[in-house]
Image (tube, helix red, strand yellow):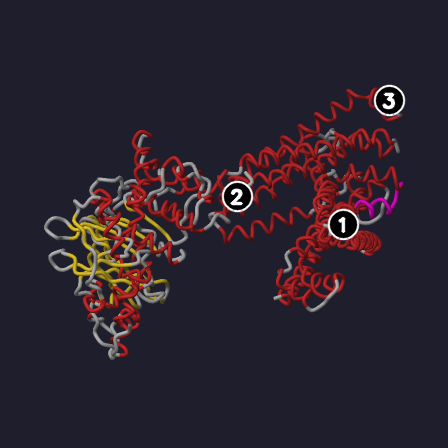
Amino acid sequence: MITFKNVSKSYGRQVVLDDLSFEIKQGQFVVLIGPSGCGKTTTLKMINRLIEPNSGEIYINGVNIMRQNPVELRRSIGYVIQQIGLFPNMTVEQNIAVVPKLLKYPKERWKPIVRELLELVNMPYEENAHKYPSELSGGQQQRIGVLRALAASPPIVLMDEPFGALDPITRDCLQEEVKKIQKKLKKTIVFVTHDMEEALKLADTIVFMNEGKIVQMASPEEMLRNPADNIVREFMGRHMQGGESPDLYVEDVMRTRILKVPKTLRTLECIDRMDRWEVNSVIVINDDETYAGTVSLEDIHKQGKPGREIGELITEETPTVSRFYKAQEVFDQLLTSPCKYLVVLNDDRTVAGLVTRTSMTKAVGKALWGAEIS
Amino acid sequence: MNFIVFVNEHYTEILTSILQHIYLVFFSVMIGILFSIPAGILLSRHKKAAEKILAVVSIVQTIPGLVMLGLALLIFGVGNTPALVVLSIYSVLPILRNTYTGLTEVQPGLIEAGRGIGMTLSQLLFRVQLPLAMPSIISGIRISTVYIVSWAALAGLIGAGGLGDLIWTGLSTYNTNYILAGAIPSAILAFLFSGIIGGVQRLATPRGLRGSTA
Amino acid sequence: MIDLIPFILEHLVIVLVATGISVVIGIVLGIVAYWLRFTAQPILWFSEAVQTIPALALLAILMILFGLGNTTIIAGLTLYALLPIVRNTHTGLISVPAAIKDAARGMGMSKLQRLFRVELPLAFPLVFSGIKISVVNSLSIAVMGVLIGAGGLGYPIYRGIQTQNLRQIMSGAIPVMIMAILFDFLMSAIERRLTKHAK
């Protein structure tokens, strides 16, 4: 989809990009990462011609972008930047609709787009569309920044450290949302960051750059397993498994004694069982024993009616992991995720157990000190 | 008491002077605006040259008003034209400077965002930069106008008419009534214009920029 | 050239005396506006209003009060010079970091001690920049003094206009401009040193 062929760029004697060649496939989430000054942002900005190469060619769907009108090119590519860049003189709606309007969409066409996009990030149209950016929190502003990039449904979206200025919790939420949106709308996203955790979380492919060259281009798993050199290794930092510490997998840190209920269970009976188990949420399984979702006591109290089936209340927000994942990867997820537990699945999508903070602590303690903690 | 009687006797003369004064101010500020805003836009695209040009223009501004009027008098003779020329020149700097700073102080992130989503230079100018610079530009117009009301009074010296004429008559004949009949309306005009343009400035401030009180 | 020197000196004296008075009044007003917060608005409004009045109108009205001569132009320039000094003093004082004010209070300084040992010294670079603006403006406005019977470089300029003599106009104008540029340059240099020290 996006192809760089021998692209070089220098400012005076300073070489920023050195004979760069790579390809990004359609529908991929590609993260460019590396130390500052490695050329990642320059690479990104070349895709929409905010920066132009000294030599080499860039193709999008086989078309050389240097032969395209830059303004038209940019309108067909979404763009999100760290400073957010919402126009303070325009409302949320006007900001989102700015590219469709540039493309001369009629009002009947862009209005529904705005509404739809706002729904996508759970910001109801009525409440938010007529606010000004200054009336939104930083996280909401950047949500709108992302929506603005999506408004003209460009197949490609470029993101230049979009979450760098947000607090960790907000950043986490937005990462999830962007990943979800990307999968749902099947966008090709090129994303620049200097945060390896972010890269590991989001990327299908990570492009690690240093001094204007690509050091390694690989999937997150591959990069964790076989970092190409020391700089990559250093960047991975704590995400790499340490040499001395024992190999722990998810199955080593999960608890298996858990409450599973069939979808068809009635609400009252479910509450009763949860009481006896002294838990406030429960895993729901399909008829073939595969994982269906979770239901919390709170959900039942809020939305459940007596006599109805529990299957109606399922939420799928709880993260799931494979039992063969490294425990270390899951550890971070557990600490940063708003959920208190993760559901562990077998390869056939049946439920193997749960990782909770307690189960994780116990297992880590046991591995470190070799004794069961009571 | 005397003054009221005086005003009663001379009100056509006073009214004519006020209208002449407004005419002088209006036209010279208009010329200033028509020149300065496009020039400010141009300067904002050539920042290196801009600093030098603005420095030169502000030196012109230090030329005392009396001197400028004297020079205009020598070149154009007595009357309206020299006054309009001088006043227009004086109205340029504040508007020019405020247009320039208003445009260049638009956050670079917004410019990058605008370019990145495919705005042409003129779309960027009219949809983003000018609306955001508007408060600053209008504040420049306000400063200019207050100046020009003041300088226009001086222009009475070279026969441009206006309230300066009355003040001048008063000063040269030591007639307090004439002085007050010129000075008071000219002060009122200055406050009036300043207030009106201040109001326009608040209206022209994009709603998203008007703090939480708006 | 030689016969210009008395005019230049008189011009300078008028401007410096007026600015001097203005500095004293302006700083005091700035401090009052800072200490008694409810006075800030009226004080700033007053100094701004004075500057809005057309110069010739202000001078003419002052002439009714003070008569022809240097007193009137000095009074006018003093009023005109107030705004930048008052505003900058006030802004300078309120923008002294709260932590520094707290530290001074915590060390047991009285209100006056805080003002003279901490707040005013920290605000001074900004106050000085206000003074600079006032001086440069006054140099140019003082030319109008000739219209109300005061001395200074307005005199040769006005004579030049009356006799339609370009050379004579310029003989008054050029010293005024040179002084304005010179003061601006020198005081800007001092200002830069002051702000450097403040950091």
The residue located at (58%, 41%) in the rendering is: B95
Question: Looking at numbered disc 1 in the image, what kind of residue is underneath it?
Answer: Ser
Characterize the local packing of mark 3: few (<14), some (14-19) or many (20 or more) Cα atoms within 10 angstroms.
Answer: few
Q: Which mark is residue B40?
A: 2
Q: Which mark is residue B5?
A: 3
Q: Chain of mark 2?
A: B
Does residue C71 show up magenta in the picture?
yes
Q: Which mark is residue A77?
A: none
2 or 1: mark nearer the eye: 2
Q: Secondary structure at mark 1?
A: helix
Q: Secondary structure at mark 2?
A: helix
Question: Looking at numbered disc 2 in the image, what kind of residue is underneath it?
Answer: Gly
Characterize the local packing of mark 2: few (<14), some (14-19) or many (20 or more) Cα atoms within 10 angstroms.
Answer: many
Chain part drawn in magenta: C67-76
Would residue C169 appear left or right of A284 to someone viewing this image? right
Q: Are marks 3 and 1 on the same chain?
A: no
